[in-house]
């Protein structure tokens, strides 16, 4: 006997990303803010002053990627249970990508799922991590290996919180913005060449465009089966760089910056991109103090590390390549010798 | 600025529940069987002999509800990572409800979700736990408080595995079967009065009907907002009984059996159900060695414990009541005095 199960009542997901000064928020629910010690010291009072809730709790965790673990999530869950949050309660993720990923993950687990709202406080999380529904934690085997796809109820992006962001982290966020432009939107790329990031209006326009582009991609491919992989432009090389430098020398966005320059050189070799366009990308990255050079000590070893990535399930590596500004392609059978030739151009003397 | 996010590409979920002798299964993927020490000793060889896979791993955990924890899930995840399972790999849950819930939960977490298949080996998990997508673990605050909604790729139900199931656990499974009949299907109830559970054909028919009824309910209400609550018939009282007896005196199905008898008495008091129909339910439960009596030591204390349940988010308790065999209703404003009057009829001398 066979009983066919067909669940057809899955509702589509809708929410808004609001890019503006943070409005006053009123919730007829219990609310818990999840934040880290750094953001808490700088901005918690501001946030609390803007929230009305049935009950308002604050869970503060230490700042840093090393706390992005199942252990921390369990401690957050414990605190939420001790406050007797119920199925209608809400979490607010208040911080950068680590806080957003862990809070969303915690929300997905609490009584099999409660609501959460993102209030990202770094440029990277404002343009990137707050849209897409990827949540999770690291373990000893790698980054983001344990998690869930889980969407927020809303995202509030207020550029005010970026005023306290270190300049280097601000630049790292710009790397992901450049990534979106190179992959999807030539006009946006040229706008980025002219824009003044210190002007609130310009900054909001940049964020709006990046979020919109990402939302389009995620909508087409929520679970990362196809086009969403394009968001990994620069990341295949970047991950190896992060790995080789023990995740300590470069911020993620900095490694992606170098990764984009590397993969653009591959694009040029393949005749997909002109040398002058690749130079425009490098120039824009340099303008924002992003690194574009890296000394590959051992080409063979660098090459081998491509295969560590969790996305390569069948020993083929998918390279996301620019086909010129605003256009992309994916190739998974790039010749080993060509790749090593490109890598060797990054080997210093 | 507001960017509206609308994810409309969520695909509906389809899978089969196959009720038959376990077929030979061939997977062009890495597979890990998750099972417990008891089932492993009895049936692992049988299962392994029926599976072809790229790689086949076995993760064995201790048997018992006390191991249904985030800690155990983390240890399973670690073992899967050490075997380098990838995004295309598959878990097979081989055991009762605890194994099913934890394996499904682990599958939902591994690299944000890999496939899993259920091969339930208890009557309860065959009729109940293997359909519905509820996965999770317990913590010190209660049962199933941490988890995810996550559906299997397929469920294989082979009554052969029930031959080694202790009679008492078999009966506990019948309680959930009776529950489905009383709530949804009068004809099925009368069929249950006549059926011979020792005959494979009868047993398969019973399982098929229970699974079909549950699938209909879950399809209408995957995330338990409405009608799915009907599956909690007998559970509101049953949970208090389990709590009062420290989850040690009664199996879950036994507590539900008593709970159904209790809530039927409430139905009779409210004029929803005839006394004779309530007696038919009690008689069927007794026929299968299920308990129908319980000595409530302290009526007020029993009453107060209704409010511990995680489903009562606003201090109202939803009672799922029979309106006669095959029909149900939900009432959330039952008079405290009436409830206590019903409870006091279960107080011995």
Image (tube, coloured by chain):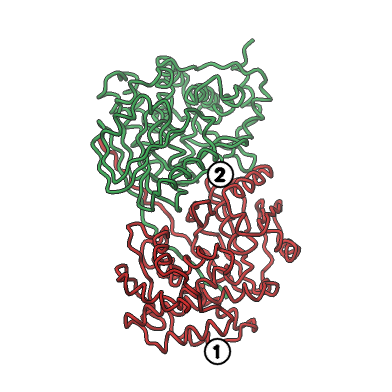
Chain colours: A green, B red
Q: First in sequence: mark 1 or mark 2?
A: 2
Real-space Cα separation, disc 1 to disc 2, in angstroms: 48 Å
Give the SS element for disc 2: loop
Q: Is residue B85 above or below residue A212?
A: below
- On the image, the x and y values in percent for residue B130 come to 55, 65
Q: Is residue A12 above or below residue A126?
A: below
Determine whether, in the image, residue B308 is placed left or right of residue A237. left
Residue at the spot x=36%, y=40% of the render? A57
- On the image, the x and y values in percent for residue A166 come to 40, 18
Quarter of the rendering containing residue B174: bottom right
Determine whether, in the image, residue A12 is placed left or right of residue A227. left
Q: Nearer the viewer, mark 1 or mark 2?
A: 1
Residue at the spot x=71%, y=54% of the render? B58
Is A325 in front, or is B316?
B316
Residue at the spot x=49%, y=17% of the render? A291
Q: Which residue is mark 2?
A: B111
Is A315 in front, or is A125?
A125
Is B299 in front, or is A177?
B299
Which quarter shows the N terminus of chain A?
bottom right
């Amino acid at each position: 006997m066979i009983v066919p199960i067909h669940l057809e009542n899955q509702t589509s997901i809708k929410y808004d990303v609001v890019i503006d000064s943070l409005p006053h928020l009123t919730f007829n629910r219990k609310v818990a803010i999840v934040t880290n010690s750094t953001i808490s010291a700088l901005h918690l009072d501001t946030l609390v002053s803007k929230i009305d809730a049935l009950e308002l709790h604050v869970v503060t965790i230490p700042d840093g990627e090393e706390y992005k673990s199942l252990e921390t999530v369990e401690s957050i869950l414990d605190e939420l249970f001790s406050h007797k949050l119920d199925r209608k309660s809400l979490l607010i993720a208040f911080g950068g990508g680590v806080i957003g990923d862990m809070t969303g993950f915690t929300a997905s687990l609490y009584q099999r799922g409660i609501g959460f709202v993102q209030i990202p406080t770094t440029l990277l999380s404002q343009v990137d991590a707050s849209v897409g529904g990827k949540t999770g934690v690291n373990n000893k085997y790698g980054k983001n290996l344990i998690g869930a796809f889980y969407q927020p109820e809303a995202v509030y992006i207020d550029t005010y919180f970026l005023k306290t962001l270190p300049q280097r982290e601000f630049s790292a966020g710009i790397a992901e913005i450049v990534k979106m432009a190179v992959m999807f939107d030539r006009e946006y790329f040229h706008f980025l060449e002219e824009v003044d990031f210190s002007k609130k209006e310009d900054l909001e326009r940049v964020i709006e465009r990046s979020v919109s582009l990402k939302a389009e991609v995620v909508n087409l491919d929520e679970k990362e089966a196809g086009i969403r992989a394009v968001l990994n432009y620069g990341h295949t090389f970047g991950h190896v760089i992060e790995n080789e430098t023990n995740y300590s020398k470069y911020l993620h966005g900095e490694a992606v910056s170098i990764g984009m320059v590397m993969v653009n050189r591959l694009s040029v070799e393949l005749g997909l991109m002109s040398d002058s366009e690749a130079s425009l990308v490098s120039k824009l990255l340099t303008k924002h103090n992003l690194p574009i050079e890296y000394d590959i000590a051992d080409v063979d070893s660098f090459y081998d590390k491509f295969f560590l990535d969790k996305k390569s399930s069948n020993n083929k590596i998918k390279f996301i390549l620019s086909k010129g500004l605003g256009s992309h392609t994916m190739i998974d059978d790039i010749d080993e010798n060509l790749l090593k030739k490109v890598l060797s151009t990054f080997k210093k003397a």
